[in-house]
Amino acid sequence: MTLVLSSHAGDPAQLATPLLALALSSDAKFPRALAALDAASGGGIGRAIKQRDFKGNRDESLLLFTTGRGPQRVLLIGMGALPAAGAVTRAASIAGRRANGMGVGKMAFWADGLDARGVENAAVGISLGAWEFTELKSAPASGEKTTPLSAAVICVGKIAGAAVALANGRAVAEGQRIARRLAMLPGNICTPSYIAQAARDIAKRHKLGCSVYGRADLKKFGMGSFLAVAQGTPQDPKLIVLEYRGGAKGAPPVALVGKGLCFDSGGISIKPADRMEWMKFDMSGAAGVLGAMEAIARMKLKINVVGLVGSTTNMPSGTSMNPGDVVTASNGKTIEIINTDAEGRLVLADVLVYAARFKPQAVIDAATLTGAVVVALGNTAVGVLGNDQALVDEVLAAGRLGGEPGWQLPLWPEYKEQIKSDVADMKNIGSRGAGTITAAHFLAEFTQGYQWVHLDIAGTAYTEADLVAIPRGPTGTPVRTFVEFVRGRAR
C-alpha cells in the first residue's frame, strides 16, 4: 500500500492527528516551537525531559497522551547527542514503525530545524519504518486487525523548496518500496520473468524504454558466462534493459547494473541447508536498480540513465555447470569454473560487457556478491571498489548522502594473481583470503572502455536481525546510493 506523504507549515500543536512524533537530540534545549504543544500536554513533554524520563538517546522513545483538539498522542524519539547524518531518517523510520504497529492509520512528524534535505530524509524514513510485508499472510481475525499507516504529515516550518523536497522523498520512498517488496518475495514467485514484468510495469508507468531478452537472445549475444549459470534451471534467464531518457538526446547515460539471482542454491557446489532460505535475497542488486529507476523517473532528473539486470536462478541439476568447466564470456575471455557458488560474477560479467554498447559516462553495479564482505565490514558498510578513484569517491559521497555508507577496498594488482587459471584466461574464484577484492578483480576484466564502480551489498541489502528502525528483511540498499549518484550527475 502506498503511503501518502504531505506537509504542514503551521504550529504542530494545531495538528489534529492520532500521533505526533517529535525527534529530539539529547543535548538540545527544549524547542520554543513546541511551547503550545507542551501546554496541551499539561506540561508533560517539558517535565519528561527535565526529569530525565526522556533523555534523547538514540532510539529512545516515550509515548505521552494529550488533551484538546491537537495531537491525541505525542511520541518522543531520541536522536542522540550531536545527531549524525542520517539521524532524522532513523528517527522518522522508528516513528513510522511505531505508528504502523499501533494501528493509528495516520501520523505526523516534527524535528527541529529541518532543512529541505531533512524533509526528504524524514519522508524516506517514515516510509522505511512503516513498510510491512503482509501480502502472503492470511488476513487476521477481525478482532486482531489493526489499521496500517497510510498517511503521514511532515512539519516543515517555512522552508524554501519544501514541496520539492517532499516530492523527492516520495519518489525515493516508492523506489525503496518496490525494491524491498521484490526482495522479500520468495523465489518461487519472484522469478526472472516476474522481475522482467516488474521492469515492464515501471517502463509503462513512466514511459521508459524497456527490452527483455531470454535464453535464445543470450546465445545470440554470446553470453556463455551468464548462460553457464542458467543452464541448471528450466526457468528462462532474463537480461533486462530499462532506459530513462531525461537528458539530451545522444548524451552518454549513467548505467546501473544489478545482479538478479532469484534464488542461489550454490549449484553443484551446493550451500549448507542452514539459512539457505535467505538466498532469495540474492537478487537485491537487481531490485535496487529497478527501485532506483522508479525514483529517478518520478524525480524527472535531466540525465540519461540505463538500468541493466541479469536475472536467473542457480540450481543443481543434470544440466548444471560443474567445477572444472570452462566457459566463454561475450568479450571472448575464457573462465574456469572452480566453484559454482561464485555465480553472480559470471552473470555480471556478460551484463557489464553489454553495458559498453551504451557508451556510458559511468557504470555502477550492485550485487550481493561475497560472504567475504560481511567478514570484512559486517552489516554496516557497503564494500566499494572500482577502476577510477574519482568515480569511487563520487559513489562513496552518494552513499553517505543517502544513508548507505560504503568503505573502499583496494583493487591492487597483487590480488589479481589469485584468479589466474592454468587452463583458461581466469578462474571464477581465488583463495579464501580477500574474496571481495578478487571478485571485483574478476568483474574488472569485463569493464574495458568505461569508468566503473562495484558495490558489494551482501552485508547491507538485507538484515537477519531486527535493526530497531526496520525489521528483519530487505533494507532498500542500494536504491539511495544509486539515486544520489544520478542526482549529483544531473545537477
Image: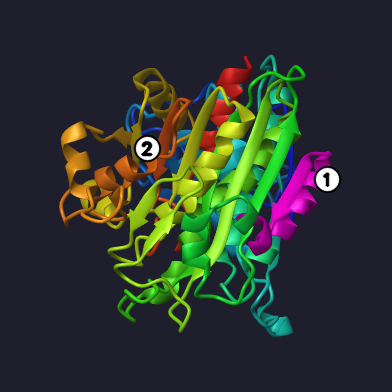
Span highlighted in magenta in the image: 195-218
Alpha carbon of mark 2 to alpha carbon of mark 1: how far? 34 Å
Q: Which mark is residue 444?
A: 2
**CB of mark 2 within 8 Å of CB of mark 1?**
no
What x and y, as percent, mark residue 358? 63, 30
What x and y, as percent, mark residue 410? 23, 33
Picture residue at 60% right of the left edge, 26% below the top? 359
Q: Is residue 235 left or right of residue 382?
A: right
- Circle 2 Cα neighbour tier, 10 Å, few/some/many (<14 / 14–19 / ≥20): some
Q: Is residue 104 visible?
A: no
- Circle 1 Cα neighbour tier, 10 Å, few/some/many (<14 / 14–19 / ≥20): few
Q: Is residue 223 visible?
A: yes
Q: Nearer the viewer, residue 453 or 40?
A: 453
Quarter location, residue 264 = bottom left
Q: Which residue is disc 1 drawn over?
A: 205
Q: Nearer the viewer, residue 478 or 2?
A: 478
